Image: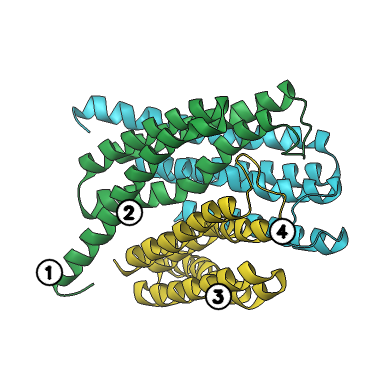
Chain colours: A cyan, B yellow, C green
Amino acid sequence: MLVAIVSLLALILYFVMGLQVGRARSQYKIEAPATTGNPDFERVFRVHANTLEWLPLFLVSLWLFAAYWDDRVAAVVGVVWIAGRILYMTGYSKAAASRSTGFSIQALAVGVLLFGALGRIIYLAISGGGV
Amino acid sequence: MLVAIVSLLALILYFVMGLQVGRARSQYKIEAPATTGNPDFERVFRVHANTLEWLPLFLVSLWLFAAYWDDRVAAVVGVVWIAGRILYMTGYSKAAASRSTGFSIQALAVGVLLFGALGRIIYLAISGGGV
Amino acid sequence: MLVAIVSLLALILYFVMGLQVGRARSQYKIEAPATTGNPDFERVFRVHANTLEWLPLFLVSLWLFAAYWDDRVAAVVGVVWIAGRILYMTGYSKAAASRSTGFSIQALAVGVLLFGALGRIIYLAISGGGV
């Protein structure tokens, strides 16, 4: 249940990033279907797009970590991912160079979830004598 | 089982949108790897891309609503989402301004699923005395 | 358990494609937030982006095929998808025309999983007398 709540909170943050793209569209006068033409708009657009790029990595790893290992640990690491993504969003919206810290935090969180889940599943398969 | 069918139908629609991008590539002579250069192509490209952007919001919310609340209601709202996406596709393919109605319908459907699921999980956690 | 391992391996490949976009950014001097400007960069970018576009089709179909039909068959077809994606990556990185073989293999794998899952669920619904 904890990872379900964390997933929905992550999606609400992602939804907010989408709203900001809409707002930046009218602010910088970038008419659909264009997605380029002004670096200030493009940074806001890339915050949303990059988060989409990482969502499959995050969501699948989060749920497999929770299913095969520990729901509570998965949820805590998931909250770290969300915090990293908020930092990434606020940093990148200001300047491209300010996106690194938040990006590294969320990448580390995904790494823990992905390799934790994979390691645990392989361990269970070996120790249990089957997959 | 109902949300499984709805998910696969939504993915088939999304797949059709991808086929239309391929067709628009040759029609408007936009050679890969380019994704810009002609607004008529870009609108077809954005129909597919925007649907991808919303798929994680839709799919995760659909399944959590079904798991924690009601499979049948989730499936019905899922069908509304698909209908909104079809309207969005046919509208946006013609003109950027015609994308609003379908977009609003699908956004509303996702809102019902996402906040319905989140509200229900929090309610269950509180009334059940734990998560 | 098998489809969990296949999912994580697919995500690791997708993660590697993301790393290659980062490397291509510095190699071809495409500063964030730009994602265009050099066809050599754009091909590497599109390998990653196109794989993201197909991940929902692949992951949802893989798990539903495994859940409603056969975990082992799903895992084998999933490995075929990964192989097709590797071929697509190595081909497309060199030239746009070299992306077709790998693309067709992975599309076929998704088709088997998606329509296999859908057909099986409908069959179960009819033969079981309900959904």
Q: Residue at x 45, y 36 (%)?
A: C100
x, y percent for residue A24: 81, 58
* Badge 4 amino acid: Pro
Whichever of labels 1 and 2 marks the residue nearer the N terminus, that label is 2
C119 left or right of B90 in image = left
In three-dimensional space, the C-alpha distance between marks 1 and 2, rounded to whole angstroms, equals: 20 Å
Q: Which residue is mark 1?
A: C127
Secondary structure of the residue carrying numbered label 1: helix
Q: Residues within 10 Å of mark 1 (few under 14, many from 20)?
A: few
Whether residue C34 is visible, yes or no, is yes
Work out how far the residue at label 2 is from the one at label 4, CA to CA, in angstroms: 32 Å
Within 10 Å of the Cα at label 3, are there few (<14), some (14-19), or many (20+) other Cα atoms? many
The quarter in which the C terminus of chain A is drawn is top left
**In the rendering, which numbered label is found on residue B87?**
3
Q: Quadrant of residue B96?
A: bottom right
Nearer to us of marks 3 and 4 is 4
Secondary structure under tag 4 reads: helix
Tag 2: amino acid: Leu
Of circles 1 and 2, the one toward us is 2
- The label number, if any, that marks residue B39 in the structure image: 4
CB under 8 Å between callouts 1 and 2?
Answer: no
**Disc 2 target residue:** C114
Mark 3 to mark 4: distance in Å? 19 Å
Check if mark 3 and mark 1 are on a common chain: no
The image quadrant that residue B124 belongs to is: bottom left
Q: Is residue C50 above or below residue B58?
A: above
Residue C102 versus residue C122 in the image, above or below? above
Comparing marks 2 and 4, which lies closer to the viewer? 4
Is A47 positioned to the left or the right of B29 in the image?
Answer: right
